[in-house]
């Protein structure tokens, strides 16, 4: 076996059978996937920077803190799996309208955090936004415009949902 | 590079059978404690690991009028999701002080209580709340006060070939709680510690009192806690002054962290809970 084992999980809705070693981090195997998940930039490997965030079984997690074997039978979603969704477009529009421009290192992570937040709380307040975004450690954007972007994205999403319900 | 053997027991019984065969097996649910302490690309684990995160019976939550019962693999986010009306407020605050929302999504209650490296954040809090834990091995299961998970040398203890399956938390809303974490942010280390002091006061009388300070070891004086029962809180209460001095004196003998830190914590706690007369 050479110390390898095979685990199966869903990655962005596609079933994957992946060979792993017991000490692999989930972030390592995702960035080595074919095609690789380019949105992840595992940096600190200790759950501080937030650049390896993924959704695992509907919860936001640092993939560097998850042993790969723990992902067996899990559902994993990265920003690549959501990029065509209206929710992500709302967030991007929120960034644009708030003149908030996250850097290339943290943009995907911040987008995923906001996506997760708005999925849980339709109208988050300031402290909920601050707490959620605290999981990404990058100071490229000022907190005021970042919060404004989240409020705008929430508004866009809620209006879209409301209009859909109207039809 | 140590290659470990990974097991996925489907039930508690399967996990116990594995522990019986391979007692060196380490149980892992969230894995935050092990992964968070390592920054190398490849994680080092013990020779044999049992991944218990998805065992259904370890994720159940039940509630009665008196207590909440949680499976040990309930995540800290799962605990918080019960909402402020159900979870005692100080406990919710203590959970929120652990890591950040993303860490709490994978860290589990059992992992926080059964760490063998040191007493983690929720341990002293739940000891003060008289939480009970269910410990199962192949032949029996029993409920014990959480304080049972400290050995005679005041260090973390967990019985061999056993699993912490459930945690029962009384739904008692303590009116007076003093809680401090020392040792900075991030994953707990050898100088991290948590100080918790709780008192139930009715008509100016102490109905119950608990004080637990824990990190790599635990410090608790149950006889002093009992001695304060039914004591009246007055401006110059000799009993309270004596209890405070007793805590400071005994702590300086314990050799656990710096006495000056504990002394200021216990003084602050007494002042906060019983008034400025201390």
Image (spheres, helix red, strand yellow):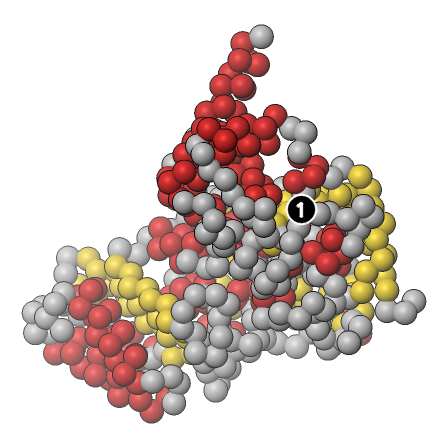
Determine which quarter of the picture holds residue A98: top left
Q: Is residue B178 above or below residue A59?
A: below
- Residue B98, percent across and down? 46, 59
* Crowd band around label 1 with a 10 angstrom C-alpha radius: few (<14), some (14–19), many (20+): many
Q: Is residue B263 above or below residue B146?
A: below
Identify the residue at image location x=74%, y=67%.
A23
SS class, disc 1:
loop
Q: Nearer the viewer, residue B141 or A17?
A: A17
Q: Residue furthest left?
A: B235
- Residue B90, percent across and down? 35, 55
Identify the residue at image location x=60%, y=43%.
A108
Identify the residue at image location x=19%, y=57%.
B202
Determine which quarter of the picture holds residue B257: bottom left
Quadrant where the N terminus of chain B lies? bottom right
Quadrant where the C terminus of chain B lies? bottom left
Q: Which residue is mark 1?
A: A39
């Amino acid at each position: 076996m050479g110390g390898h084992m095979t685990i199966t999980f869903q990655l962005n809705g596609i079933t994957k059978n992946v060979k792993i070693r017991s000490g692999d981090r989930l972030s390592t195997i995702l960035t080595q996937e074919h095609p690789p998940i380019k949105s992840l930039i595992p940096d600190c490997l200790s759950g501080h920077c937030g650049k390896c965030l993924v959704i695992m079984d509907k919860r936001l997690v640092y993939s560097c803190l998850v042993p790969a074997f723990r992902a067996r039978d899990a559902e994993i979603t990265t920003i690549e799996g959501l990029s065509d969704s209206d929710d992500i477009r709302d967030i991007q529009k929120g960034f644009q309208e708030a003149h908030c421009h996250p850097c290339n290192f943290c943009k995907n992570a911040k987008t995923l955090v906001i996506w997760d937040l708005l999925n849980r709380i339709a109208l988050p307040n300031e402290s909920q936004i601050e707490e959620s975004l605290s999981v990404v450690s990058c100071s490229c954007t000022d907190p005021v415009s970042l919060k404004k972007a989240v409020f705008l994205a929430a508004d866009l999403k809620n209006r879209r949902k409301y209009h859909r319900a109207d039809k | 590079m140590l290659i470990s053997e990974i097991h996925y027991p489907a039930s508690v019984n399967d996990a116990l059978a594995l522990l019986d065969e391979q007692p060196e097996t380490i149980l892992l649910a969230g894995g935050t404690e092990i992964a968070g302490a390592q920054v190398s690309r490849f994680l080092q684990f013990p020779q044999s690991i049992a991944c218990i995160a998805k065992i259904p019976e370890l994720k159940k939550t039940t509630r009665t009028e008196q207590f909440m019962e949680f499976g040990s693999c309930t995540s800290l986010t799962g605990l918080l999701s019960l909402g402020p009306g159900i979870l005692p407020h100080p406990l919710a605050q203590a959970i929120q002080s652990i890591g950040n929302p993303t860490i709490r999504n994978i860290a589990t209650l059992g992992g926080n209580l059964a760490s063998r490296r040191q007493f983690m954040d929720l341990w002293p809090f739940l000891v003060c709340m008289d939480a009970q834990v269910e410990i199962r091995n192949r032949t029996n299961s029993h409920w014990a006060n959480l304080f049972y998970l400290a050995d005679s040398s005041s260090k973390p203890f967990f019985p061999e070939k056993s699993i912490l399956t459930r945690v029962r938390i009384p739904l008692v809303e303590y009116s007076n709680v003093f809680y401090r974490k020392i040792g900075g942010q991030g994953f707990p280390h050898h100088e991290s510690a948590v100080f918790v002091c709780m008192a139930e006061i009715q008509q100016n009388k102490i109905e119950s009192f608990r004080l637990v300070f824990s990190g790599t070891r635990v410090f608790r004086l149950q006889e002093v806690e009992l001695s304060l029962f039914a004591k009246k809180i007055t401006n110059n209460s000799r009993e309270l002054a004596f209890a405070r001095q007793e805590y400071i004196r005994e702590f300086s003998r314990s050799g656990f962290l710096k006495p000056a830190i504990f002394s200021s914590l216990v003084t602050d706690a007494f002042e906060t809970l019983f008034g400025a007369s201390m």
